[in-house]
Amino acid sequence: MPNNHCPLCYANSILPFHQDTRRHYLQCQQCQLVFADRSSLLSDTEELAQYQLHENNLDDPGYRRFLNRLAQPLLSSLPATGLSGLDFGCGPGPLLAKMLREAGQHMAVWDPYFAADTTVLQQRYDFISCSEAIEHFVNPAHEWAQWLKLLKPGGILAIMTKRYTTAAAFAGWHYKLDPTHVSFFSVNTFAYLAERDGFTLNIADKDVVILQRRKH
């Protein structure tokens, strides 16, 4: 997709947002997504090499505390145990799914590099979790459309990603320095998606949003 169309909402009202020594960033004027210049994207091989540098140990209590920032508000939003969930973008160490199973939920996992069993994308779910993955989506409209198909009416979508605020803050933001981080969301971006697609938006934490799909 070229730089003149938003990779989330497909609008063509795109303006320059920031430039550093490595790449340019653009902002959609409709949904407020900020995205990296398409010419700066890594290849699949380069991207995978970056992910393989991550150390996500299932027995690391610090990693568990980190993921609990998403797990707790998600579990508090669910009406019962025994529900069907999908951890989308689980990475090589699917600790979040393990934590949600420990809390009594039934979990499937999906990741294009580390858990690419497409049968899990043929089912529907009561909730979908996505922890520190949405910022990696090159064309987030694709994954968002998948989620709309996968999520049942009344279902919960729980997302953890750091949100940008202003252009001035973005300029000094460490989060943009990871070359695999290519899509940056704001509160306004999630509000746009919620309004467009029939969700109730709850800003649960500085990095966490909980979206509940309306039943009708």
Image (spheres, rainbow, N blue to C red):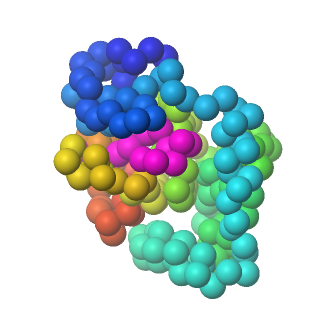
Residue drawn at x 51%, y 27% as measured from the top left: 40
Left or right: where does residue 86 sit relative to residue 154? right
Q: Nearer the viewer, residue 106 or 188?
A: 188
Left or right: where does residue 24 sit relative to residue 189? right
Q: Nearer the viewer, residue 29 or 26?
A: 26
Residue drawn at x 35%, y 15% as measured from the top left: 4
Q: Nearer the viewer, residue 128 or 47?
A: 47
Residue 133 locus on image (x, y percent): 55, 50
Whether residue 3 is situated above or below residue 119 in the rendered picture: above
Q: Splitting the image into 4 quarters, where does residue 84 fall?
A: bottom right
Residue drawn at x 61%, y 51% as measured from the top left: 88
Residue drawn at x 68%, y 60% as measured from the top left: 54
> Which quadrant is the C terminus positioned in?
top left
Report if residue 5 is visible in the image: yes
Q: Which residues are magenta?
A: 176-188
Whether residue 161 is situated above or below residue 2 in the rendered picture: below
In reply to whether residue 175 is colored magenta, the answer given is no
Report if residue 154 is visible in the image: no
Whether residue 140 is situated above or below residue 73 in the rendered picture: above
Furthest residue to the front?
21
Furthest residue to the bottom?
61
Q: Nearer the viewer, residue 149 or 113?
A: 113
Residue 86 locus on image (x, y percent): 63, 56
Residue 111 locus on image (x, y percent): 70, 47
Residue 140 locus on image (x, y percent): 48, 35
Q: Splitting the image into 4 quarters, where does residue 201 fall?
A: bottom left
Number of disc labels: 0
Left or right: where does residue 197 sit relative to residue 180? left
Left or right: where does residue 133 sit relative to residue 35? right
